[in-house]
Amino acid sequence: MNAHTEPTPREQDDPLWVNPELVLPLLEGFIRDEITKVGIPNVVVNLSGGIDSAVSCVLAARAMSPQNVTALMLPYKTSHPDSLGDAQTLARQLGIQTMTISVTEQVDPYFEKFPDMTPLRKANKMARERMTILYDQASALNALPLGTSNKTELLLGYGTIYGDMASALNPIGDLYKTQVWQMARHIDVPEEIVSKKPTADLWPGQTDESELGFTYEKADRLLFHMIDRRRSPEALERMGFEPAFIQEIERRVKQTQFKRRLPLIAKVSMRTIESDFRYPRDWGR
Amino acid sequence: MDFKVGIAQIAPALGDVHENMKRIERCIERALDEKTDLVVFPELALTGYTLKDMVPSVSLRLDSPELKRLMDASARLSIAVGFVEESPDYRFFNSAAYLEKGRIVHVHRKVYLPNYGMFEENRDFAAGSRFRAFNAAFGRCGILICEDMWHPSAAYVIAQDGCELLIALSCSPARGAQSDGDLYSADAWQTLNRVYAHLFSQYVVYANRVGYEDGVGYWGGSEAIGPDGSVIARAKQFEEQFLTAELSSDAVRRARISSPLLRDERLDITLRELKRINREREQ
């Protein structure tokens, strides 16, 4: 299945297919429940113009009232103008609050100090600047920062730790990218956003799939069988996945495990946070 | 005997026994208004599910003031409710009590504590060691808690012990949306409930919770299944609801006349073969 085309009639036979009718109320309830428990009635989202933040934003606007949702648009001087335009179109359609803050003035002086910065370092720096704005505006707006990382990104570690991976709650973190596309079609995300090539918009012309070296559809299919269905590499090979691709994905998942966990704490006492001091996050909520 | 059951499909407050007592007592009032003879609450209704290290601080002794209050309430209608039980020797069980006529008629301690995937109940709880039916106002009843229901031996033992009304309490998380049908959890539970009702010609009253804890949604869908396997009543998914169902001993009787499965069950063969299997496993 190509995510950019209409769903095929037998889509429900595809194991990657989720039932949007089931998933939608589950995710809306998740957002509503958490904001109610925490007692902070608003959410704030970094709306990039891409599919993930669009879906997170729509879910929040549906779960709450649109006036309780604020979309931040945080372009850099090289960001594609369509990104901002698409984000604005969606925000207008949803009737949510918006705020546009350029990060250029914030990051350029730093970049000038380190002229040898690689594009990756610059990208991470920008992602973390955007995170600081997200958290600061969350504080100013009495809002929770809403996450926009999907399951594919999280598993592949294709995101910036303490940057775009940071949030208080993430409604789409258990949906693969292709499932996010599927949900987007279901909840009427504008076609320009659904059909554009996924990009972190880190430098002109960048696309995720060319940088990763494979398509999301291909990665999701493998990840689904590897992670969700717990199939061994041998079984995956029998299913037709190339050994090199299986190894590549396994390597990425393992290598980026640190991004999905809290920092390691050296154990000294009889009761250490995480290992033997374990409470739910909703403790006392 | 005709009997009206209420199922309180609630979202307990995590770790807050005081708040949950209030919610449960409100449901009891509702149950009295609806003239039900029995009200059933979900697993760990007094505490919520994702307790982890909170277990010892939310546990109740059988002689605790909270259970005493519920016992007092049971003078007016029977109550089945899940809670954390602390035993006199300081073990903590995921338990359910059946209260009737002002006393504790039965306590079931969850035997099968799931400890795989997203579950780690063995870390926090001691496991029970009994499956027993008991006599109550409606007739012989049995209680199983969540994972117990996934072990057919548990339902089988209770059925052979004479059960007419199996009360199943759960905190079943919503998971598996990879289909064009229902949630994986809902499909699985509906199958279990119907099979146990039908095969053992008994009522199954299933109380599942709703609400979210740490991002996990509990799907609800509580239901009452008749002794012929038919769905008598089913609650909505993901919403709090007070569901009622009319039960009748006569329906159990007719089901057992129509399909005399219990009459024909060969306990002696089952026992002999299980003993043989056990012997062979030990070798």
Image: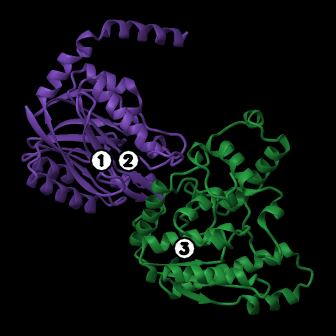
> What secondary structure is marked by label 1?
loop
Q: Quadrant of residue A238?
A: top right
Front residue of B92/A262: it is A262
Q: Quadrant of the C terminus of chain A?
A: bottom left
- The chain letter for the residue carrying disc 3 is A
Cα distance in 3D space between marks 2 and 3: 30 Å
**Residue A163 in the figure: left or right of residue B218:** right
Q: Residues within 10 Å of mark 2 (few under 14, many from 20)?
A: many
Cα distance in 3D space between marks 3 and 1: 34 Å
Q: Residues within 10 Å of mark 1 (few under 14, many from 20)?
A: many
- The chain letter for the residue carrying disc 2 is B
Viewer can see residue A89? yes
- Asked if marks 2 and 3 fall on the same chain, the answer is no
Front residue of B70/A77: it is A77
- Which residue is located at x 80 percent, y 55 percent? A214
Q: Which residue is the site of mark 2? A: B171
The circle on residue A57 is: 3
> What secondary structure is marked by label 2?
loop
* Residue type pointed to by label 2: Cys
The colour of chain B is purple
- Which residue is located at x 87 percent, y 89 percent? A112
The reply to whether dot 2 and dot 3 touch (C-beta < 8 Å) is no
* Residue type pointed to by label 3: Cys
* Residue type pointed to by label 1: Pro
The circle on residue B42 is: 1
Residue B249 higher or lower than B45, as above or below: above
Residue B282 higher or lower than B164, as above or below: above
- Asked if marks 3 and 1 fall on the same chain, the answer is no
